[in-house]
Amino acid sequence: MNKVYETAAAAFADLKGKGVVRDGMTVMVGGFGLCGIPEQLILALRDTGVKELTCISNNAGVDDWGLGLLLQTRQIRKMISSYVGENATFEKQFLSGELEVEFNPQGTLAERIRAGGAGIPAFYTATGVGTPVAEGKETRRFFRPSEDTAYHNRQRQRGGAAATAPTAPPAPPAQQRDYVLETGLFADLALVKAHTADPIGNLRYNKTARNFNPMMATAASFVIAEVEELAPLDEIDADGVHTPGNFVDRVVRTVSVKRIEQRTVRKA
Amino acid sequence: MPLTREQITQRAARELRDGFIVNLGIGMPTLVANCIPPGMDVWLQSENGLLGIGPFPTDDNVDPDLINAGKQTITARPGASCFSSADSFGMIRGGHIDMCILGAMQVSQEGDIANWMIPGKMVKGMGGAMDLVAGVKRVVVTMEHNSKDGGAKLVKQCSLPLTGQRCVHMVITELAVLELDEARRRFVLTEVAPGIGADEVKAKTEAEIIIGPGVKTIEV
């Protein structure tokens, strides 16, 4: 099995024909800011001319790089993101109503993707309770898992202690809190960035360039990974694989620009 | 004299404890990292997937794959670990972070916080703020006591859309330190800036607050 393609364009060449790339599709794109984005795959997706995309990505790139490029060409109809700060194109299209945006808390977004990939249709989280994020969603009261354990431990201790002498006063019952129901996310296509891949698609990420990439690699019908290095089979230690190869359909090695948003240094 | 931004930062740093895992918000809270008392071991978490933020890199040491939540280039300290955003927010939501320090537009007298959107203005998103205030054990807010037009920011009820409900434990401003009394669900004024009276703080605060017994002067 060899999943390696020579160029990003080659990895996309037959995808329209196969119906993988089509107007109106949902695409997940990895990265946090410009760190760990599949930059050359974004360019190749742009060049397919596909339109009306729903993009699930933590951010929206900057005006002239990352997903900002697909905003400029008006190929994105809707973004599902947590923060879209540094992008004037985004702002213009959002304010004019051309672009629809669904804001998710960052942790909720990460977990929705993880859940979608793991076959979990929905989950409860305390994040967003009492905020606009929870509007129209089901809420339910639970014990916090750690408190639930503590509560049952106390119940048991009290039961055991009743036969002998009561020592400590009974602890107050744990408080339940509100949780909001969030749904899993799954996409038609995921574009991820990793550092190293082998021919069967096992992936390793580098430092904080990992971010959303591992979950996205599990949560789409078709997954393409952009990497900096190709390793021969068996060179990535089995215990060191971050994303098992079965999740990945295609791999492309590129020379990444890796643009930095906020270069911050101290004096040597 | 009201505290300077630097003094607010220094006061916030005194909330750190040895061994704490801490998440610092973007802006003024980030500067708390420069004020960690020598000899105290504090681990800084970055929600984009790093536990153990080190100092900023030197010019020849910049790595585009290593950034903080403010997208600044950083380094990792010895013993640091990298993980996915799902693991990072599992850490946050699961209560494995001891403290976060973040800014706010409004805090209510019951500890609600609003810091992510102003209706009618361009919304940039909440990022990780909602997860942090919902999951971190202790939430400390550093902010200006009043808005630029003099309006109160510590209010009876937030008029802005919330980031989280009943989650703020402490507020540090240029005038005062207030700590939430969980039982009474009100903030207690515990410290004032040098030369600032409790009455002045009360006058500049819309929220119903309790003037604690033995209000201290903030050491600067």
Image: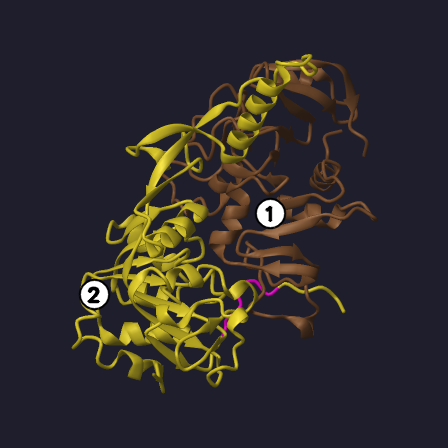
- Whole-number angstrom distance, CA of label 2 to CA of label 1: 37 Å
Q: Position of residue B56 (x, y in %)?
A: 68, 61
Tally the numbered discs.
Answer: 2
Q: Position of residue A41 (x, y in %)?
A: 35, 74
Letter of the chain that mark 2 sits on in the rendering: A
Q: Which mark is residue A51?
A: 2
Q: Amino acid at mark 2?
A: Lys
List the single residue furthest toward the front: A163
Q: Is residue B186 visible?
A: no
Q: Is residue A255 visible?
A: yes
Of B204 and B208, the residue lying toward us: B208
What residue appears at the point 54 percent right and 26 percent down from the top-left corner?
Answer: A151
In this structure image, what is the colour of chain A?
Answer: yellow
Question: Which residue is under mark 1?
Answer: B27
Crowd rating for badge 2 (residues with CA inside 10 Å; few <14, some 14–19, many 20+): some
Letter of the chain that mark 1 sits on in the rendering: B
What residue appears at the point 45 percent right and 57 percent down from the top-left corner?
Answer: A86
In this structure image, what is the colour of chain B?
Answer: brown
Of A134 and A241, the residue lying toward us: A241
Q: Amino acid at mark 1?
A: Gly
